[in-house]
Image (cartoon, grey):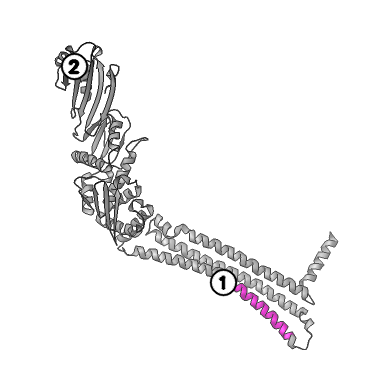
């Protein structure tokens, strides 16, 4: 705006507040800014804004120039100025919102002024502007080529004023008033959508502020009752129980999930029914966690509960989660029992083998035969056949254990799939704990099976070797020795 006179002026300072822009500078009378140059500045200012230029000489003579001033008036003022005088100038622009357009002449100055304010004051400023603009507002920027916008506020470089606002702000405000109560809503007639940046750019000074304002308003619209007053936000959520929250607005950090919950409530379907369900779930989940820390798990639970509500099964959600938890607990218990069942069968087998052995010894003790003739060829054959039977029993027990485990795992997968049509993917993952319990149990059972199998096989081998060693007529060892002897002769 002042580029064409920069070589003539000094001590330039600029400020831009909400509705006023001021620029102060000085210039020498011998190299004065001409009337045409000042008029050119005025021509660049939209007619919706009022511009005045104040000139003051060192002798405190003043001249105020506006759109109606003439060149003759300017020449008359300058004619009384001495050649070596320094003239002080101030440009003052009073900005007015008109037809949904509002001027920003120095964007970063404007942003600095807004960002330094308390957040409740910022809310009041934008509420006032949007109330005047009704549905949407275009901030026409004269010195910033980077565009960004929300659903209702467009920050666009001058000359690029094409917008396509399809968001019905009045309708959404009406829905919010029907669903939640915001105390002094007339002062803060705002929506989270007003600050949800749809398209932005790197380094935007409003990015963090808008994110936090979006979160404050989303929390207010999700809550049953809310009050913004004296730099604080107080919220009450009434669901299966009542929860009260209080925060300093300036301490609030952004939370994208709160906006998603708000947007889900007010986008399609009955917003009142959705809000009731959302508040019930939040009351259950946020017993010990602040509302502003809600995460995607809560959103998934809300959506799942609503899916059940649409099926006329509102109360089934919590029952379903309890049933899933009970079923998973039952599976863990059964898999643990199947793992220890293999050990029980191993112990039973040991008792059976030793019981048979003792019965043979006892039978020989009470007989007329001497004790050293217990392990005859016939007894050895019988004992080794028992061991062979034990091996077969081992294989059967192992196959049975595997079959039982597979049946349990299949039932787990079938139950999981049956809930996929009702619960969301995130909710299914949360209910089944991302299969972590099942995977841990599989590893535990696998280790236990390997350990028990090793013990069983080791026992059979040791017992077999002992029988062959103490038998008067071993069956296998002689055959092995004969085979080994022949192999040595050949080689």
Secondary element at image label 1: helix
Any part of residue 173 in sight: yes
- The first of marks 2 and 1 along the sequence is 2
| Rendering quarter of residue 298 | bottom left
The label on residue 59 is: 2
Is 46 located above or below residue 342 in the figure?
above
Q: Residues within 10 Å of mark 1 (few under 14, many from 20)?
A: some
The magenta stretch spans which residues? 343-364
Q: Is the magenta stretch mostly helix, strand or loop?
A: helix
The image's mark for residue 397 is: none
| Residue at 24% from the left image edge and 35% from the top image edge | 138
Left or right: where does residue 145 sit relative to residue 356?
left
Looking at the image, is mark 2 or mark 1 nearer the viewer? 2
The residue carrying mark 1 is 341
- Residue 361 drawn in magenta: yes
Q: Can residue 270 be seen in this view?
A: no
Query: Would you say 229 lies left or right of 321 here?
Result: left
How far from the left and from the top, in percent, is residue 159?
26, 28
Q: Where the N terminus falls, by quadrant?
A: top left
Q: Quadrant of residue 169?
A: top left
Asked whether 163 or 297 is in front, the reply is 297
Q: Is residue 381 left or right of residue 223?
A: right
Q: What element carries label 2?
A: loop
Picture coordinates of residue 475, whole percent (x, y): 77, 74
Q: How far apart are marks 2 and 1 (CA)?
A: 108 Å
Q: In percent of the image, x 56 and y 66: which residue is there?
A: 402
Near mark 2 (Cα within 10 A), the count class, few <14, some 14-19 or many ≥20, is few
């Amino acid at each position: 705006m002042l580029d064409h006179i920069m070589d003539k002026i000094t001590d330039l300072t600029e400020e831009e507040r909400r509705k006023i822009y001021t620029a102060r500078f000085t210039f020498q009378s011998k190299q004065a800014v001409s009337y045409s140059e000042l008029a050119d500045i005025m021509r660049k200012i939209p007619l919706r804004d009022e511009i005045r230029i104040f000139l003051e000489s060192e002798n405190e003579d003043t001249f105020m120039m506006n759109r109606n001033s003439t060149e003759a008036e300017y020449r008359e003022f300058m004619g009384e100025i001495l050649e070596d005088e320094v003239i002080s100038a101030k440009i003052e622009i009073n900005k007015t919102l008109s037809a949904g357009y509002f001027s920003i002449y120095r964007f970063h100055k404007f942003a600095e002024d807004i960002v330094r304010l308390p957040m409740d004051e910022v809310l009041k400023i934008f509420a006032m502007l949007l109330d005047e603009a009704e549905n949407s507002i275009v901030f026409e920027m004269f010195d910033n080529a980077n565009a960004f916008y929300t659903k209702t506020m467009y920050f666009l470089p001058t000359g690029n004023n094409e917008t396509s606002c399809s968001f019905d702000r009045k309708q959404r405000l009406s829905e919010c008033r029907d669903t939640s109560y915001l105390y002094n809503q007339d002062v803060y007639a705002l929506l989270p959508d007003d600050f949800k940046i749809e398209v932005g750019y790197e380094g935007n000074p409003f990015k963090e502020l808008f994110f936090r304002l979006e979160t404050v308003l989303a929390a207010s619209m999700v809550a049953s009752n809310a009050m913004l007053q004296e730099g604080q936000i107080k919220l009450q959520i009434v669901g299966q129980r009542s929860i009260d929250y209080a925060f300093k607005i300036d301490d609030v950090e952004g939370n994208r999930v709160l906006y998603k919950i708000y947007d889900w409530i007010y986008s399609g379907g009955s917003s009142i029914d959705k809000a009731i369900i959302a508040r019930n779930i939040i009351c259950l989940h946020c017993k010990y966690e602040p509302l502003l820390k809600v995460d995607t798990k809560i959103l998934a639970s809300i959506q799942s509960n609503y899916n059940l509500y649409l099926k006329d099964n509102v109360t089934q959600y919590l029952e379903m989660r309890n049933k899933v938890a009970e079923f998973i607990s039952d599976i863990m218990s059964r898999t643990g029992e199947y793992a220890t069942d293999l050990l029980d069968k191993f112990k039973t087998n040991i008792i059976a083998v030793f019981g048979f052995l003792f019965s043979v010894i006892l039978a020989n003790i009470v007989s007329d035969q001497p004790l050293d003739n217990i392990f005859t060829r016939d007894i050895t054959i019988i004992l080794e056949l028992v061991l062979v039977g034990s091996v077969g029993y081992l294989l059967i027990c192992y196959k049975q254990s595997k079959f039982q485990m597979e049946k349990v795992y299949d039932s787990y997968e079938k139950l999981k799939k049956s809930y996929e049509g009702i619960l969301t993917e995130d909710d299914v993952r949360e209910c089944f704990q991302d299969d972590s319990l099942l995977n841990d149990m599989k590893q535990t059972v696998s280790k236990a099976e390997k350990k028990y199998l090793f013990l069983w096989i080791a026992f059979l081998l040791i017992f077999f070797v002992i029988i062959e060693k103490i038998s008067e007529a071993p069956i296998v060892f002689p055959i092995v020795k004969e085979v080994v002897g022949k192999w040595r002769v050949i080689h």
